[in-house]
């Protein structure tokens, strides 16, 4: 495979979709997003099946929730690519979250949901006629969770995930005799355990452990990411966080997590992520959110040439989030959050690539009172 072709494929299928090259998988929920994803110690809606299943124990009503996550990931270069005559790459995706929970016993809640952890579709634009480079990947999760309130202050939650990995790639480049067209899919399984402790009404602490998952994917010799030609590994993650009501109408939350990505590939190292967020309850119906989180580079420096990059700064990302939630009735509420990334450009063979990531989340939830 020619070097420039590999650059295009990585941009489109690796960097652009965020699934492979980044540690930060898509996280559901507008309210959680508004908190800067520092939600492990809050977890008071149905996205708790992802952030912390222990939070479900305090949710006694039967409820449903639907959420959409939109990601827009444009990339441009300061000059035309000399091989393909293109200076624009793009990817976008709209991914869903659907959840349901109900009281199973007086101190136990059961929940289930389907959502996407990562993925998107990317393509190179402006290619000559007869050329085509586009790909799509996704991690679809099928979850069932159970949470029990041990005491008024302490709860435990367990979750089970069936993770379906799907990978599609079309790369038609007559110049190099390349004609790739494949579609593969496989399942892996993951367990989650969450703890939540509320020593006071104003203070909450939480811990979550996600076991990670190994997906045995059918081998494709021309797969979009060579390190995952035979398997896909989802990282083991532990996360700790707290939430504190600074005032009656203002909550501050923070979290730290370690992503054990070194076992997924020898090219990766383990990384830490930091998250902070606030919620200001402006009225009885309206809440406003502001948050920040980091997503550092996970690729080892000695393997940067594998990705044909002169540096890895583009993978050190920081995100700023804002959001709002409105309670229409005692049963119905909706939320919206927007996220923008702060990233660095990357250069290869005299071409500088610039890009940004914009995320949008919207929630609608209903409780059967």
Image (cartoon, rainbow, N blue to C red):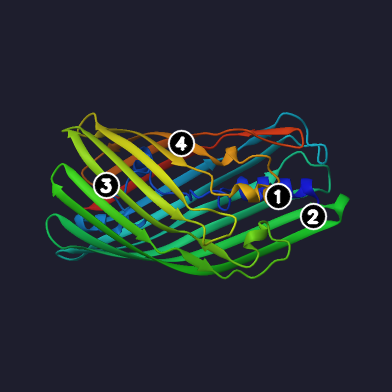
Residue under circle 1?
Answer: 9
For image coordinates 63% across by 66% down, the residue present is: 184
Residue 42: image tag: 3
Front position among marks 2 and 3 = 2
CA separation in Å, label 2 and label 3: 48 Å
- First reached walking from the N terminus: tag 3 or tag 4: 3
- Left or right of 203? Residue 253 is right
In-front residue for pair 262/111: 262
Q: Residues within 10 Å of mark 2 (few under 14, many from 20)?
A: few
Q: Is residue 313 visible?
A: yes
- Say whether disc 2 or disc 4 marks the residue closer to the N-terminus: 2
Residues at circles 2 and 4 in contact by the CB criterion of under 8 Å = no
Label 2 and label 1: CA atoms lie apart by: 10 Å
- In the shown orientation, is residue 233 left or right of residue 130? left
Can you say whether 233 is above or below 21 in the image?
below
Measured in 3D between alpha carbons, the distance from the residue under mark 3 to the one under mark 4, in whole angstroms, is 20 Å
Instruction: Assess disc 4: are there few (<14), some (14-19) or many (≥20) residues with their C-alpha within 10 Å of its C-alpha.
Output: some
Measuring 54% from the left and 61% from the top, which residue is drawn there? 264
**Percent of width and height locating residue 217:** 60, 68
Q: For the residues marked 2 and 4, what is the alpha-carbon distance in whole angstroms?
A: 34 Å
Q: Badge 1: few (under 14), some or many (20 or more) residues near its Cα, within 10 Å? A: many
> Mark 3–mark 4 contact, CB under 8 Å?
no
Which residue is under mark 4? 319
Q: N-terminal of the two: label 2 or label 1?
A: 2
Q: Is residue 35 visible?
A: no
Are the residues tagged 2 and 1 within 8 Å (C-beta)?
yes
Q: Which mark is residue 1?
A: 2
The answer for how far apart the CA atoms under marks 4 and 1 are is: 25 Å
Local secondary structure at mark 1: helix
């Amino acid at each position: 495979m020619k070097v420039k072709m590999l650059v295009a494929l990585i941009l489109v299928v690796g960097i652009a979709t965020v699934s492979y090259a980044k540690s930060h998988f898509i996280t559901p929920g507008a309210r959680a997003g508004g908190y800067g994803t520092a939600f492990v110690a809050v977890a008071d809606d149905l996205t708790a099946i992802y952030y912390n299943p222990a939070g479900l124990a305090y949710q006694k009503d039967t409820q449903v929730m639907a959420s959409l996550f939109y990601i827009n990931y444009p990339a441009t270069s300061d000059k035309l690519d000399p091989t393909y005559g293109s200076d624009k790459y793009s990817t976008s995706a709209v991914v869903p979250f659907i959840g349901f929970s109900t009281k199973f016993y007086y101190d136990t809640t059961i929940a289930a949901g389907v959502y996407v952890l990562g993925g998107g579709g990317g393509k190179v634009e402006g290619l000559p006629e007869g050329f085509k480079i586009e790909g799509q990947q996704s991690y679809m999760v099928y979850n069932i969770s159970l949470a029990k309130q041990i005491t008024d202050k302490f709860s435990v939650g367990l979750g089970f995930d069936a993770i379906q990995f799907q990978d599609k790639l079309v790369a038609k480049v007559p110049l190099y005799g390349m004609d790739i067209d494949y579609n593969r899919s496989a399942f892996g399984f993951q367990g989650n355990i969450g703890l939540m402790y509320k020593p006071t009404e104003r203070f909450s602490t939480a811990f979550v452990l996600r076991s990670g998952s190994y997906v045995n994917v059918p081998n494709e010799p021309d797969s979009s990411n060579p390190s995952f030609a035979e398997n896909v590994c989802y990282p083991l993650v532990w996360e700790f966080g707290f939430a504190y009501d600074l005032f009656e109408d203002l909550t501050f939350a923070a979290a730290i997590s370690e992503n054990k990505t070194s076992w997924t590939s020898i090219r990766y190292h383990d990384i830490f992520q930091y998250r902070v967020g606030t919620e200001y309850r402006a009225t009885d119906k309206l809440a406003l959110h502001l948050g920040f989180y980091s997503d550092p580079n996970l690729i080892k420096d000695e393997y940067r040439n594998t990705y044909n990059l002169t540096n890895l700064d583009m993978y050190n990302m920081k995100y700023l989030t804002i959001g709002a939630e409105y309670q229409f009735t005692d049963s119905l509420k909706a939320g919206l959050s927007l996220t923008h990334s702060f990233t660095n450009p990357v250069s290869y063979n005299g071409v500088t690539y610039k890009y940004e990531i914009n995320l949008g989340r919207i929630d609608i939830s209903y409780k059967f009172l």
